[in-house]
Amino acid sequence: MARLLWTQKHDFGPSARSGHAMAFAPDRACVVLFGGLAPVSGSPTTVPAGDTWEWDGENWTQVDDMGPSARQDSAVAYDRNRDRLVLFCGLTANGPSGETWE
C-alpha cells in the first residue's frame, strides 16, 4: 500500500474555519470554498463567514463576495449536467436558511 505524503503548498489563504462548504468545480479547474465559522481576529470567538475562495492546486484566491450571506454548515455540490456549483441551506445569523444558490 502506498504511503500518503503531505506537502505544504501554501500558507496564505482563507482563515482557519470549520463548518464550511467545499467542492471541486471542473469548469474552473479549482476547488471552491465558501463560508463556515471563522475566528474573530485576536479572539477565541468565531462568527459565520461569507467569503468565497478558489484553490487552483498552487494558490488560494479570494473571489467576489457578492453571493450568499455568511453561513455555516451549508452543503455544496457540482451539478455536472448544468456545469455549476449548487449551494443549499446553512445556518445564518438569522437562523436556518433554506436558500439555494448557484
Image (spheres, rainbow, N blue to C red):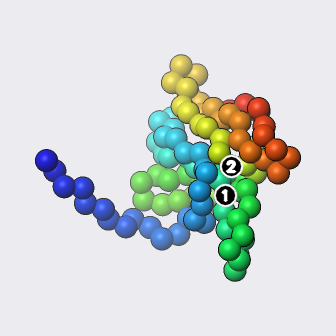
Counting the numbered discs, the total is 2
Question: Which residue matches tag 2?
Answer: 72
Rendering coords of residue 39 (x, y %): 67, 68
Rendering coords of residue 89 (x, y %): 71, 36
- Would residue 94 be visible to someone looking at this image? yes
Rendering coords of residue 42 (x, y %): 69, 80
Q: State left or right for residue 10 relative to residue 98.
A: left
| Amino acid marked by disc 2 | Gln
Q: Of callouts 1 and 2, which one flags the residue occurring earlier in the amino acid sequence?
A: 1
Identify the secondary structure beneath mark 2.
loop
Instruction: State the image quarter where residue 46 is shown.
Output: bottom right
What residue is drawn where x is 68% and y is 34%? 88
Q: Relative to the observer, which residue lies in front, 43 or 22?
A: 43
Q: State left or right for residue 28 relative to residue 20.
A: left
Residue at the left extreme, as displayed: 1
What residue is drawn where x is 63% and y is 32%? 86
What residue is drawn where x is 65% and y is 35%? 87
Q: Relative to the observer, which residue lies in front, 8 or 48?
A: 48
